[in-house]
């Protein structure tokens, strides 16, 4: 049995998402709304993966054909870039850099669209299926399914930095370095590669009291997804673990766990847990906990945590639902 399809499903399940001819250059999808929270027009398509870069958010939309947008929040404009992957690839992960917006798909690799929209798309030459994509302020990093960790130079040259035989799940860059989640054999195999370090460090949250992996290995088979760098911590979503959400502080190695329901979305202005019915819990930094927040997302909307707070994409617009912390 070929394990690749199962591994791909695992990667997509934890990630915190028919192609047509791309436009020859960027096109303005909207003007400047009259108010700071007026909805932005994003046009047709089902919202999918997104990534933030300061006050910008890149957003992929699906059917009938994949589209790639770059929006400046909160007032716009929204610019449509040529979709860089060849059909029938879809957009599963995104990262935004100073000059490029990169898109990754498990079966199609990584390709980048220049911000000017007129230069040709750049297909990165790397091995392995991409399962994580991040921008560290200087360059892109790519995590893969069994082919290691890659660093991408500004000219698009990809170099393998680390051999990792496991499924790397998600990728987060911060001042400390880069960290990824774990998959593969369904055990927490999370590691961090710090700046200027030759070898990565193993990471694992504290086990529950009286847990013994030797006598009951199933209690230690946690799957994690590196979600975000926020408020000086790396945030991990987890499956088959005592808690669904963990944070790790690189400075002292301490961990915290959060018991929340729903899909976690974290951006520069807040952390949010969104349930299937659209109701939201927002992280309250002063109380270090998630609390119910209103209003909710409407049916058919997809949460987007970006500059300003929690936004909702769907029905042709991107609208601010909950303002984030100041």
Image: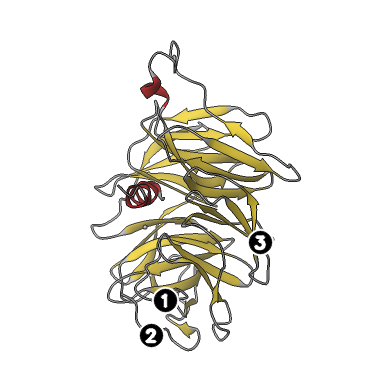
Using the image, determine if residue 89 lies above or below residue 308: below
Residue 68 point in image, percent of width and height = 44, 73
Judge by depth and name the residue closer to the eye, 74 or 257: 257
Residue 208 point in image, percent of width and height = 44, 17
Whether residue 73 appears in this view of the structure is no
Decide if residue 268 is on the left or right side of residue 82: right
Which residue matches tag 2? 21
Element marked by disc 1: loop
Residue depicted at x 23% and y 57% = 299
Decide if residue 61 is on the left or right side of residue 228: left
Please tell me which of labels 2 and 1 falls first in the chain. 2
Q: CA distance from mark 1 to mark 3?
A: 23 Å
Using the image, determine if residue 236 lies above or below residue 25: above
Q: Crowdedness of circle 2 by 10 Å Cα count: few (<14), some, many (20+)?
A: few
Contact? badges 2 and 1 (CB < 8 Å): no
Element marked by disc 2: loop
Residue depicted at x 30% and y 54% = 297
Element marked by disc 3: loop
Write down the quadrant of residue 120 in the picture. bottom right
Q: Nearer the viewer, mark 2 or mark 1?
A: 1
Q: CA distance from mark 2 to mark 3?
A: 28 Å
Which residue matches tag 3? 139
């Amino acid at each position: 049995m070929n394990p690749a399809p199962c591994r791909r499903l695992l990667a997509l399940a934890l990630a915190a998402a028919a192609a047509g001819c791309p436009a020859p250059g960027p096109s303005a999808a909207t003007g400047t709304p009259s108010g700071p929270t007026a909805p932005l027009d994003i046009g047709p398509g089902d919202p999918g993966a997104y990534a933030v870069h300061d006050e910008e958010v890149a957003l992929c939309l699906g059917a009938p054909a994949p589209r790639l947008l770059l929006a400046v929040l909160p007032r716009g404009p929204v610019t449509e870039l040529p979709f860089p992957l060849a059909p029938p690839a879809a957009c599963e992960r995104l990262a935004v850099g100073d000059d490029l917006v990169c898109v990754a798909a498990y079966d199609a690799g990584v390709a980048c669209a220049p911000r000017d929209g007129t230069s040709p798309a750049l297909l990165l030459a790397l091995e392995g299926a991409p399962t994580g994509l991040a921008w560290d302020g200087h360059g892109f990093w790519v995590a893969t399914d069994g082919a290691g960790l890659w660093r991408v130079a500004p000219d698009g040259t990809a170099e393998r930095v680390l051999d990792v035989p496991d499924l790397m799940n998600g990728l987060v860059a911060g001042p400390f370095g880069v960290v990824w989640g774990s998959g593969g054999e369904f055990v927490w195999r999370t590691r961090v590669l710090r700046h200027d370090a030759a070898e990565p460090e193993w990471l694992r949250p504290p086990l529950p009291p009286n847990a013994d992996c030797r006598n009951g290995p199933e209690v230690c088979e946690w799957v994690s997804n590196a979600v975000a760098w926020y408020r000086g911590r790396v945030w991990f979503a987890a499956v088959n673990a005592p808690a669904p959400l963990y944070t790790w502080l690189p400075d002292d190695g301490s961990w915290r766990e959060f018991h929340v329901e729903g899909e976690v979305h974290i951006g520069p202005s807040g952390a949010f847990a969104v349930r299937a019915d659209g109701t939201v819990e927002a992280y309250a930094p002063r109380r270090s906990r998630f609390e119910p927040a209103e209003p909710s997302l409407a049916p058919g909307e997809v949460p987007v945590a970006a500059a300003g707070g929690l936004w909702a994409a769907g029905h042709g617009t991107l609208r601010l639902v909950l303002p984030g912390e100041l």
